[in-house]
Image (cartoon, rainbow, N blue to C red):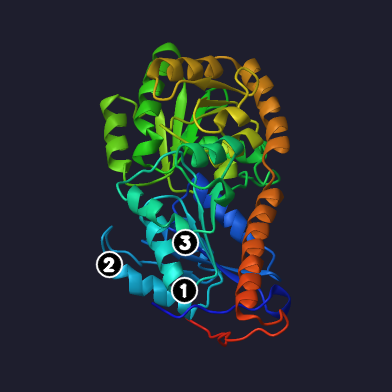
Amino acid sequence: MMRRRINLPLDGRGPLRVMYLVTSMPVGGAETLLVNLIRRMDRHRFAPELCCMKELGPLGEEMQQEVPTFHNMLSGKYDLRVVPRLTELFAMREIDAVVTVGAGDKMFWGRLCAWLAGVPVVASAIHSTGWPDSINWLNRRLTSITDRFIGVAAPHGKHLVEVEGFPQQKVTVIPNGIDTDRFVANPQTRERIRGEWGVSEDTAVCGIVAALRPEKDHALFLKAAARVIQQSPKSHFVIVGDGPERTGIESLRDELGLQDHVTMTGSRSDIPELLSAMDCFALTSKNEASPVSILEAMSTQLPVVAPRVGSIPDAVDDGVNGLLVTASNLEETAQAMATLMQDAGKRAEMGKAAREKVLRYGSLDAMVSGYQDLISGVYRQKVQAALHAARQPASNPVLVPQRTDAKAS
């Protein structure tokens, strides 16, 4: 194990180096959230970096132009070579804080290697309400070396304590936030994008923006779309995103005879423009904590169909700015989608209420401040504890390595 560092007080050093650790960076809600967070961090106080355990993904390639970015750390779930790779990376980059984003293997390896490298601050931001893989017991074993677990809404924080069993004093809630100036209805781009999709202005369009992963349950979205089309043949549906389930989703679309009714855009970076071209939004996830895509859609004045899971009911007021349904319930989901797609007046009324709600509910600035305060606060506590243990005054930092430059991929 590498020797731990004694840290410089915040007043006597440069920006804190913060490494965000993810699996990859496809176009998805959590990934977009991370991009916004990294871009908004105060560069006088923080120097953010990004590490993808696997491939970069479209958003990772985009961030590669803005911050030090690393990838291909893990070739498989049980690739033990990840330990020296990550540990050496954290040490070489002299990282002050590691924040893992999401559960699974990156949460385990990221925290373990941060501890081995002597990183002062170790935190995990968790965006779901369940463990998606079998490594959960190992992740729980690392609770003692984790400074904070970050929930994305009050009910989610409660879940982390009462269901996942994390110590209450280690759980911090930082609500998701979006850029409401960017996610705004745009009539000019609406016409252009709908032209790309080959749909007229009088065709109702319902969309979903989510990485093509099993937990997002795009199959439910397609099956509900098939039912809506039986009632409203002119309806059109759009799936924005990419991922490991793409082949299966395309096959199901074709099996249901929806080739002319469903557009699959793949990975796109112009999400605000795509949302502006839709008339309503649906999310069919099996579980969620506080999905960013819903906030983005609401900000763009789209009424939402979503399951009653996680913190979604905090954002979506049933019958006011959207319709809530039972998770994985095909009949309820199809009926809610049909209700919105068949009533332009209801869509306009709910869309206006959705925009008003998200302006109150999801502030990007508040989210960024929450992360900055958490990281600097824990770092300050660690410095004070180290200096107290060494019985040295706070003005005399010791054993701090010289900053070195390392090449990012």
**Label 3: how many Cα within 10 Å (few below 14, some 14–19, many 20+):** some
Q: Secondary structure at mark 2?
A: loop
* Tag 1: amino acid: Phe
- Which label is found at residue 90? 1
- Counting from the top left corner in percent of width and height, residue 234 is at 46, 19
Q: Is residue 49 left or right of residue 51?
A: right
Asked which secondary structure carries label 3, the reply is helix
Q: Disc 1 versus disc 3: distance between alpha carbons?
A: 16 Å
In the displayed structure image, the side of residue 102 where residue 387 appears, left or right: right
Number of residues whose C-alpha sits closer than 10 Å to that of mark 2, classed few (under 14), some (14–19) or many (20 or more): few
Identify the secondary structure beneath mark 1. Answer: helix
Disc 1 crowd, CA 10 A, few/some/many (<14, 14-19, 20+): many
Q: Is residue 21 visible?
A: no
Q: Quadrant of residue 130?
A: top left
- Mark sitting earlier along the chain (1/2): 2
Which residue is at 49% across, 37% downward?
Answer: 162
The quarter of the image holding the C terminus is: bottom left
User: Residue 357 occupies which quadrant of the picture?
Assistant: top right
Mark before the other along the chain sequence, 3 or 2: 2
Which label sits in the foreground, 1 or 3?
3
Seen from the viewer's position, the closer of residues 300 and 43 is 43
* Residue most extreme to the top: 231
| Residue 145 circle label | 3
Q: How many marks?
A: 3
Task: Point out residue 276 in the picture as x, y percentages from the top left corner.
Answer: 60, 36
The numbered disc on residue 80 is 2
Q: CA distance from mark 1 to mark 2?
A: 16 Å
Residue shown at 32%/64% (left/top)? 74
User: Residue 121: where, in percent of width, then height?
Assistant: 55, 65
